[in-house]
Image (cartoon, coloured by chain):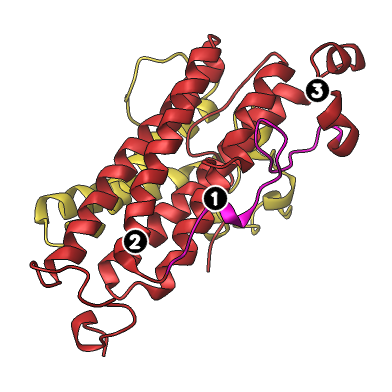
Amino acid sequence: MWNYERRLEYPVNIKESNANLAQVIISQYGGPDGEMGASMRYLSQRYSCPYREVSGILTDIGTEELAHLEMVATIVHQLTKDLSMEEIEATGFSNYYVDHTVGVWPQAAGGVPFNACEFQSKGDIITDLMEDMAAEQKARTTYDNILRLIHEPDICEPIKFLRMREVVHFQRFGEALRIVQDKLNEKNFYAFNPGFDCDECSGKK
Amino acid sequence: MLQLMNTHFASEQEKLLHDIGILNFVTIELSLYLDTHPADRNAMEYFNHYNHMTKQAKKEYAEKFGPLTLETADTTDCGTWKWATLPMPWEGGCA
C-alpha cells in the first residue's frame, strides 16, 4: 500500500505563466521517457523479480518516481493555471487547451498520449534492469534538453533536482544488476531465467 | 530547529518545511543506498539518525501548522479536519 505525504519532494514555486515551456516539460509527465512510465515500469517489474533486495530497490525507486510525477505535474500546473485566452492563442497552446483546458493530462511534448508500450515488464530480471538503466539515461538526456530551453531559476532548480535523481537511480540499478549477476553462473548469465526456471536459485523456494 | 542553509525564509512554517525536505531527502537517499548495500552499518547509523530527525520535524510541523501525513494528523485540539483543508502541495507558496 502507499501513504500520501502532503508536500513535494523538492519545492516548486513558479510565479510566471509560460505555455511554451509547459508544452515541453509535460513530456516528463506522460512522454516516452517521463515519470509516469518510470514509476509504472519499476512498480510493475518487481513482482516477477526473484531477488528480494532487487524487488526492494524497484519498489523504492518506483515510489520516488511517483513523487517526481507530482513535481512535474506541479510545474506544468503552475506554468499554465493563470494563462489568458490571448496567451493560449498566441503560444500554440490551443491544441492542448481544447481537450484539457488547463488540466494536467499525460502526453508527450508532441501531443502523443501516454501509452504503456513506452515501458516493458519482461519477466526476466536481467532484461528488466537493463531497460531500467537505459530509461534513467533517457530521462536524464530529456532533462538536459529541457535545461537548454529554460533560463528561469524557479523552473531550472526543480528540473536540475530531477535530473540529478536520474543519475543516482542509474547507479542503484547498476548495483542491482551486479547483485543479480553475482547469483548466476558467471560463465553464462543467460543459462536460465531465475524468475521463471529455477526456484532454488531465487532463495524464495 | 536546525540551521541547514543560509536561505531567507518568509516564515517559520516555510523554514520548517524546507528543513523537512532536506532531512527526508537524506533518508530517501540512504534508503536507496541501503537497498543495494544492506550490510553497511555506517549507512544504517546515518539512516537511523536522519530518520529520527525527519519524524521529529514532521511532528513539530503538524503541531504548529497542520499534518503533512495521516500519521501526524491529530484533531483533538482544534476540532477541524485540517488534512482536508490545508493547501495542496501544487499550490506553491509554502507547500
Residues at circles 2 and 1 in contact by the CB criterion of under 8 Å: no
Q: Evaluate whether residue B62 shows in this view.
A: no
Residue range highlighted in magenta: A101-122
The span from disc 2 to disc 3 (Cα, nearest Å) is 39 Å
Q: What crowding class fits label 2: few (fewer than 14 Cα within 10 Å), some (14-19), or many (20 or more)? A: some
In the rendered image, residue A160, in percent from the top left (x then y), is placed at 43, 24
Q: Which residue is mark 1?
A: A37
In depth, the one of B17 and B92 nearer the eye is B92
Establish whether labels 2 and 3 are both on one chain.
Answer: yes
User: What's under tag 3, amino acid-wise?
Assistant: Phe
Q: Which residue is mark 3?
A: A93
Does label 2 or label 1 sit earlier along the sequence?
1
Taking the spot 47% from the left edge, 54% from the top edge, the residue there is A63
Q: Quadrant of the C terminus of chain A?
A: bottom left
User: Chain B appears in which tint?
Assistant: yellow
The residue under label 2 is: A127
Q: Is residue A106 magenta?
A: yes
Up-down relation of residue A92 to residue A44 (above or below): above
User: Label 2 is found on which chain of the structure?
Assistant: A
